[in-house]
Image (spheres, rainbow, N blue to C red):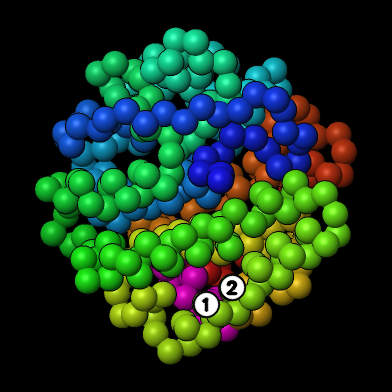
C-alpha cells in the first residue's frame, strides 16, 4: 500500500524502498515540522488537514523541490544545491533527517515526513497514520473554526469511506503503472471509474461525501481529483472520462478548492513539473515536456 511519494511513475522502480518510520509523537506545540511536496498527493493531504484544523500554528511546514536533482534519484532536496537548506532543520537533503531516525537508512526518503525539530529525526512517514493522528490526538490545538473531520457518530463511516478512497481511487494511478497486462490495467481502470460514478451520484444529493459536513474522506478524494485531468487522464491512461464529465464531482471539487486550506496547498505548476519533467535535467524529449498551461480560472 502506497502512502508516500517515493519514486516517479515515469521511471522504473528501483530496488531501494522506503522504510516505514512510526515512533511516538508527543502532542506538543512547536516541536514538529511537516516536510512535504506540493506535487505529492499523499503529502498534500496532510498539509491541507494541518491548515484546515488550524494546526499550522503549532506544526510548521517545509517544502522539498518538485523536481529531483539529476544526481540524486533516491533523495529529496530543499534546493538546487546542497548549499540550500531547510531554514528550521538546517539539512539540505531529506535523507539526512531519515538517518537521524535510522542511522543505517539506505532506502528512499519519502514525503510526507513529520520531523522532530529537537532531534532532526523523522518520527513518522505514513500518510494514513498522520491523517488520523492529526484529526484526533491534536484536538487541544484545533482552531475554534476547525471542522470535525472525524466525528464520533460517523467514525465507522469515515473509516470505511477512507479505505474505499485509498484502495479504489488514491492507489489506482500508481498501480496502473505497474500493470503487467491489458486485463490488469482494465480491471484497475474499471474500479476507478465505477467508484467515481458512485461518488458522483452521492454528491448529486449532498454537499460532501458523508452528508452536510466536510470530513476526512473529502480531503483524501480531493487530492486525486485535482490531479486527474492534468496528469492521470494522460499519463496513467485513465482516459475513459474526465473529472469535468462528472457534474456533481466537478462542482464538489471546485467547492473544496475555494476553501483556503485546499487552494493554498494546491500548486498546478508543481504538479505538472514533477509528473512530466521529473528532474532538473534539461528537457530534451517530448515525454518530459510539461503540458501548456492550465485554466486555473475554471477552478475558481
Classify mark 2: helix, strand or loop. Answer: helix
Front in this rendered view, residue 137 or 71: 137
Q: Which mark is residue 199?
A: 1
How many numbered markers are drawn?
Answer: 2
Q: Residue at x 36, y 49 (%)?
A: 131
Front in this rendered view, residue 275 or 100: 100
x, y percent for residue 175: 68, 51
Q: Does 206 sit left or right of 154 as displayed?
A: right
Q: Is residue 5 above or below residue 131?
A: above
Q: Are marks 1 and 2 in contact (CB under 8 Å)?
A: yes
Q: Residue at x 60, y 58 (%)?
A: 227
- Residue 233 placement: quadrant: bottom right
Classify mark 1: helix, strand or loop. Answer: helix
Q: Is residue 163 above or below residue 139?
A: below
- Which residues, given as a range, are shown in magenta? 247-259
Q: Inspect the magenta stretch and tell me whether residue 129 lies in it.
A: no
For the view shown, which residue lies furthest in the top direction?
Answer: 103
Front in this rendered view, residue 234 or 166: 166
Q: Which mark is residue 195?
A: 2
x, y percent for residue 276: 73, 44
Q: Does 137 sit left or right of 60 as displayed?
A: left
Amino acid at each position: 500500500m502506497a502512502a508516500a511519494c517515493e519514486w516517479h511513475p515515469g521511471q522504473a522502480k528501483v530496488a531501494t524502498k522506503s522504510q516505514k518510520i512510526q515512533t511516538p509523537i508527543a502532542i506538543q506545540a512547536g516541536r514538529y515540522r511537516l516536510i512535504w511536496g506540493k506535487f505529492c498527493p499523499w503529502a498534500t493531504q496532510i498539509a491541507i488537514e494541518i491548515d484546515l484544523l488550524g494546526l499550522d500554528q503549532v506544526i510548521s511546514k517545509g517544502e522539498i523541490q518538485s523536481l529531483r536533482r539529476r544526481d540524486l534519484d533516491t533523495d529529496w532536496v530543499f534546493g538546487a544545491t546542497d548549499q540550500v537548506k531547510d531554514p528550521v532543520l538546517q539539512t539540505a537533503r531529506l535523507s539526512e533527517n531519515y538517518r537521524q531516525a535510522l542511522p543505517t537508512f539506505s532506502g528512499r526518503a519519502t514525503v510526507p515526513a513529520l520531523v522532530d525539530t529537537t532531534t532532526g529525526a523523522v518520527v513518522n512517514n505514513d500518510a494514513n497514520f498522520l491523517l488520523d493522528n492529526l484529526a484526533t490526538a491534536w484536538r487541544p490545538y484545533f482552531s475554534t473554526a476547525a471542522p470535525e473531520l472525524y466525528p464520533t457518530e460517523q467514525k465507522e463511516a469515515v473509516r470505511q469511506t477512507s479505505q474505499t478512497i485509498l484502495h479504489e481511487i488514491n492507489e489506482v494511478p500508481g498501480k496502473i503503472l505497474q500493470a503487467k497486462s491489458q486485463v490488469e490495467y482494465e480491471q484497475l481502470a474499471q474500479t476507478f471509474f465505477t467508484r467515481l460514478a458512485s461518488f458522483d451520484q452521492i454528491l448529486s444529493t449532498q454537499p460532501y461525501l458523508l452528508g452536510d459536513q466536510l470530513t476526512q474522506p473529502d480531503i483524501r478524494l480531493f487530492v486525486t481529483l485535482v490531479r486527474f485531468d492534468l496528469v492521470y487522464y494522460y499519463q496513467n491512461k485513465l482516459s475513459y472520462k474526465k473529472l469535468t464529465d462528472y457534474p456533481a464531482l466537478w462542482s464538489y471539487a471546485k467547492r473544496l478548492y475555494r476553501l483556503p486550506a485546499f487552494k493554498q496547498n494546491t500548486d498546478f505548476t508543481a504538479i505538472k513539473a514533477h509528473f512530466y519533467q521529473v528532474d532538473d535535467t534539461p528537457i530534451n524529449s517530448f515525454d518530459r515536456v510539461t503540458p501548456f498551461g492550465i485554466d486555473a480560472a475554471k477552478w475558481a
